[in-house]
Image (cartoon, helix red, strand yellow):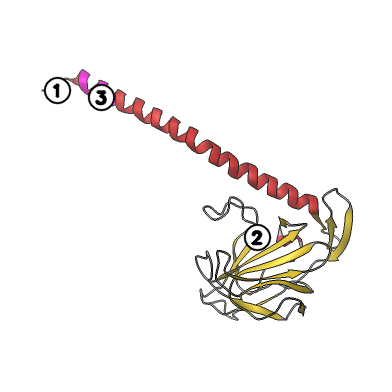
Amino acid sequence: MIKLSTIRVAISFRNELMIIFGTLAFLILMPVIAVVVIANAGVSAVSSALVSVNPTTQVVNIYNPTGGLVTQLSLSSTWPVAGVVTLEFGVSNYPYQVSHSGIDIADVRGVIGQPVTTFAEGTVSKVMNIDNQYGRYVFIDHGNNIVSEYWHLSSASVIVGQHVVPGNVIGMEGETGLATGPHVHFQIDVYGVPVNPRSFIIGNPPLGYSNGN
């Protein structure tokens, strides 16, 4: 017959083990958590330092790395593709990115083939029509060290050096590269640093279907 005191000792020992393992797990995970928090805060801070928006005039101010005003732009109303935003800028996108460098826009019906356009006038600077981790993609140079990127396309329909304006189809939404479903990763870099695309574009993307289904 097992004594009551023996059972109490066993339970106490188990509780102590749980506390020890819980503490160890926290200490192991703490650096990872800290990296994510610091990275997100850093990305947001850098983004705000390079781009600011006047909510009254809807003017976008672009600054260089030393803080000097480079140019002013009007907010765009053209989203690159129809769909819903499934992942915002700056949030954790583990295991792909510690801090998400753009905005993911997914097809409402989960199908491939929505046309993709540029959010602003520019010149095509890079085209990749071969699968890689970013999928097939198009980069567009908008001048003043502003470049927009469109990843995970099923195909690109432009060539380097081509002038494009909002409404011109630059490719088709796809699921190429490291993608978990049909979507476009929409990214904007200023001086080579990812900034929040919402600083350049107003509202949200259209759903793409009249009934929203």
How far apart are the alpha carbons under marks 2 and 3? 52 Å
Question: Does residue 77 show up magenta in the picture?
Answer: no
Q: Amino acid at mark 1?
A: Ile
Dots 2, 1 in contact, CB < 8 A: no
Q: Amino acid at mark 3?
A: Ala
- Residue 177 visible? The answer is yes
Which numbered dot is residue 10? 3
Magenta span of residues: 5-12
**197 in relation to 3, above or below:** below
User: Which residue, given by chain and number where applicable, does mark 2 sit on?
Assistant: 102
- Residue for point 65% across, 74% down: 81
Q: Quadrant of residue 72?
A: bottom right
x%, y% of residue 202?
Answer: 74, 66
- Residue for point 64% across, 42% down: 38
Label 1 SS? loop
Question: Is tag 1's residue or tag 3's residue first in the polypeptide sequence?
Answer: 1
Residue 142 is left or right of residue 213, and the answer is right
Which numbered dot is residue 2? 1
Q: Residues within 10 Å of mark 2 (few under 14, many from 20)?
A: many
Q: Quadrant of residue 79?
A: bottom right
Taking depth in this image into account, of 26 and 205 the one nearest to the observer is 26
